[in-house]
Image: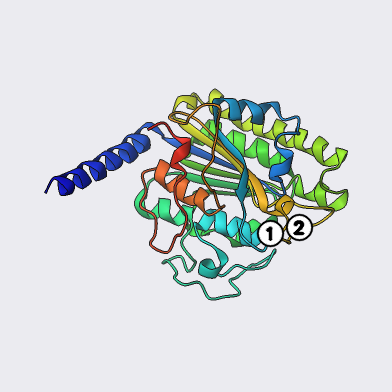
Amino acid sequence: MKNYLKIILLLTCLSLTATAQSKKIKHVVLIGCDGFGGYALDEANMPNLKAMMASGSWTAKARCVLPSSSAVNWASLLMGAGPTEHGYTEWDSKTPEIPSVTKTGYGMFPGIFSVIRDQKKEAKTAIVYSWGGIAHLFERQAVSIIVDGKEKDDFSADTAAAIIRKEKPLFTFLHLDEPDGTGHSIGHRTPAYYKQLELVDQRIGKIVKAVKDAGIADETIILVTADHGGTGKGHGGKSLDEVQIPWIISGPGVRKNHEIKNVIITYDTAATLAWIMGLTPPQSWRGQPVKEAFIH
């Protein structure tokens, strides 16, 4: 009987923790940087991102799913599960090569946008993306604001910043095409690659400033991560340079200057977003919230 009461008390405490977290946070911003290898996090000159690390929790050793390519990993990040479940298996997948194990009323494997729409019907959401391939990886009918940045990262960052200032969405996803383009054209671990990361950092800074300008910094979580890294002028293989990605989270309730030691796979991102917003994840998701990043 005592053990039963202990279990009930523990479950109640966990429930209250999640409820308190969701009530405190009213806005979440996800910034995805295409081709940002975890190896570059320590060496890159990125003052805005380093400030987020100092005020939040981070790791340079989160991992993508295989293959270490774009669409399969952006799908996994947004859909809380791997390619075996959602079915997107190629770098430019537009439809699942393997039938999704389940579909929602939107005709796709459940992603974070449909989870928000189904459980918080009046919530405002936004997505701004630079790479056109992202357009096939989310449920358009479930999103309030959709902007195709047409491979222009500065335009995408400026647009996302403007949306945050004016609309203050519950959830905003900004996808940046760099440093992937530089990695392909010039190479990873090159001076040009690191120089491009300085520009990426400036774009991240625009989003951080927009959150402050909107007066919502004390109720906003910002999460920065990537789909994959790279080696030479490519990616898709199994090296750690390709597989390891940065994962940085900052905001109210997040542990400060904390290096995350627990394992993070990219599909844990969607699960973490859902947990922050007080949402119930679909049964088909395999990701777990990264609770180590938060003060308990």
- Residue underneath mark 2: 235
Residue count near mark 2 (Cα–Cα under 10 Å), binned few <14, some 14–19, many ≥20 = many
Say what amino acid the circle numbered 1 marks.
Ser
Residue count near mark 1 (Cα–Cα under 10 Å), binned few <14, some 14–19, many ≥20 = many
Q: Nearer the viewer, residue 231 or 214?
A: 231
The residues bearing labels 1 and 2 have C-alpha atoms spaced at a distance of 6 Å
188 is higher (above) or lower (below) than 69? above
Q: How many marks?
A: 2
Which element is circle 1 on? loop
Which element is circle 2 on? loop
- Residue underneath mark 1: 68
Please state if 199 lies on the left or on the right of 52 as rendered.
Answer: right
Q: Which mark is residue 243?
A: none
**For the view shown, which residue lies furthest in the front direction?**
2
198 is higher (above) or lower (below) than 102? above
Quarter of image, res 132: bottom right
Q: Are marks 1 and 2 in contact (CB under 8 Å)?
A: yes
| The C terminus sits in image quarter | top left
Q: Nearer the viewer, residue 51 or 14?
A: 14
**Residue 98 x/y as whole percent:** 57, 75
203 is higher (above) or lower (below) than 129? above
Please state if 16 lies on the left or on the right of 170 as rendered.
Answer: left
- x 36%, y 38%: residue: 22
**Residue 34 x/y as whole percent:** 70, 49
Q: Nearer the viewer, residue 293 or 46?
A: 293
**Residue 275 x/y as whole percent:** 40, 45
**Residue 72 x/y as whole percent:** 62, 62
Please state if 141 lies on the left or on the right of 31 as rendered.
Answer: left
- x 62%, y 54%: residue: 64
Mark 1 vs 2, N-terminal side: 1
Say what amino acid the circle numbered 2 marks.
His
**For the view shown, which residue lies furthest in the left direction?**
1
